[in-house]
Image (tube, rainbow, N blue to C red):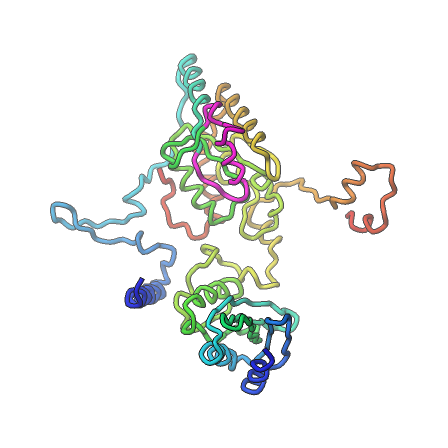
Amino acid sequence: MNEILDKIKQKYNAEDVTVQRERLAFVTVAKDLAIDAVTWLRDYEGFSHFVMMSCVDWMEEGKFQLLYLLHNPDTKIDIGVKTYIDRENPVMESAHHLWKQIWTYQRELHEAFGIDFPGSPRVDENFVLEGWDDIPHMRREFNTKEYSEKTYFPRPGRKTYDPATYMQEKLYPNQPVTAKRKDNDK
Amino acid sequence: MSEKDMNSKVSEMLARSEANAKNSGKKFVRPEDEEREVVAPDGSIIKVNPIYDYFSGARPEEEKPRNGIVEKFLNWARAESIWVLGFGTGCGSIEIPPLVTPRFDMFRFGVQMRPTPRQSNAFIISGYLSVKTLKRVIRTYEQMPSPKYVLALGSCTINGGMYYDSYSTINRLDHYIPVDVYIAGCMPRPEALLAGFGKLKELIKAGKAEKANEYARNFDWYKANQKKIVKDWNMPDYNW
C-alpha cells in the first residue's frame, strides 16, 4: 500500500493522501495528470477493475471534484484518484478509452452536473431524465423544491409536523415538551 | 460474445451516436420513429411516418350509458371482473404480488392480473411516479379499452408524499390521468388495496366510475398538463 502511494506521490505530485483503511486510499492529483495516473495504475500496477466514477459539487470553492475509484484484484487494494476541475467551465479529459463502462459514467455526469467530456461516445444522450431543459439537476444551486412547486401542481393545504413533537402531543399530552423539540416545531 | 462481435457492436454504436449528434435538431424522434420508405409485399414503395401512421390519431369519445336496466346489468358485470394491468411504479408494486397469494387472494373478488393493457380494465398506479414513467403510464392508460378504472395507491399519488419536493416525480396524479379510487397510506397494506377494490366495485355498481368519459370530456386539459411536464413528447396525442 505505502509503496504504491509513494510511487504516485513521486510520479504525479499527489497531494492530500488519505489512507482510509488498510486497503483503501485516496489521492488528489492535478487535472491534466489525473487520466495519466489512472492509466498508469491500470497498465503498470494491476488496478484492472474500474469500480466507479463520481463527482462532488464544491459550490463555495467554485470547483467540481471528480473521483476515479480503482481496484486491484490481486492485492485487493482500492485507490481513489481525485481531481478538481473548474465549476464555471467544467471540461474534463475523457477516459472512455480505458474502460467501456466509463462511457456511461461520463454520460451520467454530463447530465447531472453539466460536465463536458469531449470525445466520449454518446455523452450527449439522455441518461435518466428525458428532455430535461433546466440547469443540471445535481448542481447545488438547483432548487428542487422550487422547481417542483413551479412544475407539478402542489396540492394546497400540505402541512409538515416534526414527528417527535407531534407524537408527544398526541400520545403523551401531559408530559412537558423538551426545549430541543420545541425549536424543531415550526 | 467474441472480441470481434464486441468491436463491431461498439463501432456500430459510435456511428449511431455520430448520426444522432448530426440530427440534433429533431432529437426527440427516436430512430425507429423517423419517417422512412418501406417496401410493401407487392413491391411498391410506401412512405411511412410511424408516429402518425401506426396509431389512430382520433380523439377519445365519450361513451353514453345504455338504457336503465341494461346499464345496471353491464355495471354489475363490470364490477365482478376487474382485470388489473401488471404495471408497477414505485414501492407500491411490491404490495401487489401478495394479493395473488392464498393469504389475500384477490381472485375471490373477481380481480386478476393481466399482462397487457389490451386485456385489462383497471390500472393501479402504485406509488411515486417519475415523469419518465408518467409518459409510459399515459401511453398504457390510453391503450386500455374503455370502461377503465384507475386506482391510485399511496400518498405519493395524492400529494407527492415524501417526494413532494423532488424534481423528477409528480405531485398530483389526478392532473394527468383521472383517478377513481385513492388508497391512502405509505405504503398501504394489501388489505387496504382489497378495500380499495371493494370501493371501486361499489362505484361501478352505482354507475359513478365514469372517469374514462371524464378523460374524453376534459381531454385538452389533461393533454396540456401532460405536455407541460413531458418535454420530449414523441408520440401521438392519443395512443388508442
Task: Pinpoint residue B82: horizontal percent, then vertical percent.
Answer: 44, 27
- Side (left or right) of B173 relative to A19: left
Which residue corresponds to the image point at 44% horizontal and 59% vertical from the top-left?
A126
Q: Quadrant of the N terminus of chain B?
A: bottom left
How many numbered badges does the structure rendering display? Answer: 0
Q: Nearer the viewer, residue B161 or A27?
A: A27
Q: Nearer the viewer, residue B90 or A25?
A: A25
Going by the picture, which residue comes out furthest to the left?
A: B42
Task: Pinpoint residue B174: horizontal percent, then vertical percent.
Answer: 53, 37
Which residue corresponds to the image point at 33% horizontal and 64% vertical from the top-left?
B13
Which residue corresponds to the image point at 78% horizontal and 47% vertical from the top-left?
A185
What stretch of residues is rendered in magenta?
A: B85-111
Q: Quadrant of the C terminus of chain B?
A: top left
B88 drawn magenta: yes
Q: Nearer the viewer, residue A151 or A52?
A: A52
Going by the picture, which residue comes out furthest to the top?
A: B69
Going by the picture, which residue comes out furthest to the front?
A: A74
B94 drawn magenta: yes
Task: Pinpoint residue B10: horizontal percent, then vertical percent.
Answer: 33, 66
- Side (left or right) of B113 relative to A177: left
Rendered view: B206 above or below B188: above
Task: Pinpoint residue A97: horizontal percent, then vertical percent.
Answer: 40, 73
Can residue B34 be seen by looking at this rendering?
Answer: yes
Can residue B22 be seen by looking at this rendering?
Answer: no
Rendered view: B3 above or below B168: below
Image-quadrant location for residue B154? top right
- Side (left or right) of B12 relative to B140: left
Which residue corresponds to the image point at 57% horizontal and 87% vertical from the top-left?
A10
Rendered view: A167 above or below B79: below
